Amino acid sequence: MVNIPLANPSRELEYISNFDEKLSKQLRGGVYIGGESVNNFENNFKKIIGTKYCVSLNSGTDALILALIALGIKKGDKVLVPSFTFFSTVECILQLNAIPVFVDINLQNYTLDLNDFSKKATSKIKAAIPVHLFGNDAQITEIKKICIEKNIKLVEDVAQAFGSKNEKNNFLGSIGDIGAFSFFPSKTLGGIGDGGCITTNNYQIYKKIKMLKNHGQIKKYKHEIVGGNSRLDSINAFILNEKLAIFSKIRNTRNKFYKFYLDNLNDIEWINLPKKNNNETVLNYFTISVPVNIRSRLMAYLSQKNIGNAIYYKTPIHHQKVITKNSKKIKLKNTESASKSVLSLPLYSFPTDDELEYIVTSIRKFR
C-alpha cells in the first residue's frame, strides 16, 4: 500500500556514502558528548552561514531562550513576535517572565506584516523575534533597519529555514544579533533527535551562550554564571555533518518536489499555492491555503489515501490558554484567517517519481 509521510528524514541517510560503516565507527569510538564531531559541526555550520561564531545546543527551543538571556531580556521586557508560529517562539519569552507583543502576518508567505511590525516597534520594545516561517525570509533586511533605528535586539527564528537566503544573498540566521536554529528531524537540516544552535558575530554573546549551555562554565569546574545543560549529542552532530555534506542534493530534491507541485496544481482554482521569496529559498513545509469549508474534507480524503498532512498552525498562540492577559483584546486579522485555511502537504528530500505522481493525482481527483 502507498504511504506518503509528511516528512521523511530517514531517506536522506540512504544518500550518505558508507553511512552504516561511518556510524558504527562513531558508536565504537565512545565519545557521545562533545568531541571532534561537535567541533567539526560548529565550524562547518558557521562557515556555511557566514558568521564568526556558532554554538551547538540540544534544541531550537534552547537556542531561543539562551539567545534572549544572552541579550539581557528580563522580567517585564516587551518582545515583538508573531502569533502564527510554533509555541516555542513565544514560550522562550514567557520563560523569562517577559511580555510577548504579537504582530500580525502577511498572507503571501505567512511571515511578519512589515507595517504592523513597524507600528508596534516603539521605544518600549526590547527585542524582536521574526520567524522565517516555512523557509521564507521574514523581510529580515527591512526588519533589521527598524530594529537598529529603535534600538531593538534582533533574534532570527530560523528553525524552519536553514539553507534559505535573503534578497541580498545572505543566509538567514546571519543578519540579526543572533540566529536560532532547530535540527528537529523534519527540518531542512534534520538530526536524529532534538538539536539546535545559535549563530552570531558578537563574541560576548558567543561566550555567554557557551557558558549558559554548559552549567555556566567556560572551563571545567570554573562556574562563572548560572547555566544549564544544553549540549548537542556527538552522534547527532555526526549525522548533521554528513547531511551538511550532501545539502546541495537535499536542496535540489526538495526544490524538485516544490516545482512538481506548482507545475501540476497551479490550475486548481480552490488551492492557493505557496510562493517563495526568491530562488534561494528552501521550503521546510509546502503549505497551501484552501477555503474554510473544504479543509477538513480534504484532510480526511488525504489521510484515507495515506498521504500525510497537517495544519501549522490551527490555533494561534494569542488564543492559547497560557496567554490569558488581554488575549481577547488582541486582534490579528491575517493570523486568524490563515489558521482557518492553511494545510501542509508532504515535502521531503529525494522523493520518487511515483510518490510525486500519486500525491498530485490524488489531489486532482478530490471533490
Image (cartoon, rainbow, N blue to C red):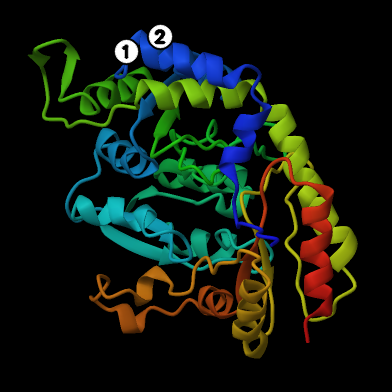
Could you tell me residue 1's position as x and y percent? Answer: 69, 62
Residue 249 quadrant: top right
> For the residues carrying marks 2 and 1, which lies nearer the camera in this image?
1
Neighbourhood count class around disc 1 (C-alpha, 10 Å): few under 14, some 14–19, many 20 upward: some
Could you tell me residue 332's position as x and y percent? Answer: 48, 76
Q: Earlier in the sequence, mark 2 or mark 1?
A: 1
Whether residue 208 is visible here, answered yes or no, is: yes
How far apart, in angstroms, are the residues tagged by discs 2 and 1? 9 Å
**Residue bearing mark 2:** 36
Pick the quarter of the image with the C terminus: bottom right
Q: Which mark is residue 31?
A: 1
The amino acid type, in three-letter code, at marker 1 is Val
Residue drawn 31% across and 12% down? 30
Side of 308 where 232 appears, left or right: left
Could you tell me residue 166's position as x and y percent? Answer: 67, 40
Neighbourhood count class around disc 2 (C-alpha, 10 Å): few under 14, some 14–19, many 20 upward: few
Q: Is residue 235 above or below residue 341?
A: above
* Number of numbered labels in the structure image: 2
Side of 91 where 293 appears, left or right: right
Residue drawn 64% across and 76% down? 304
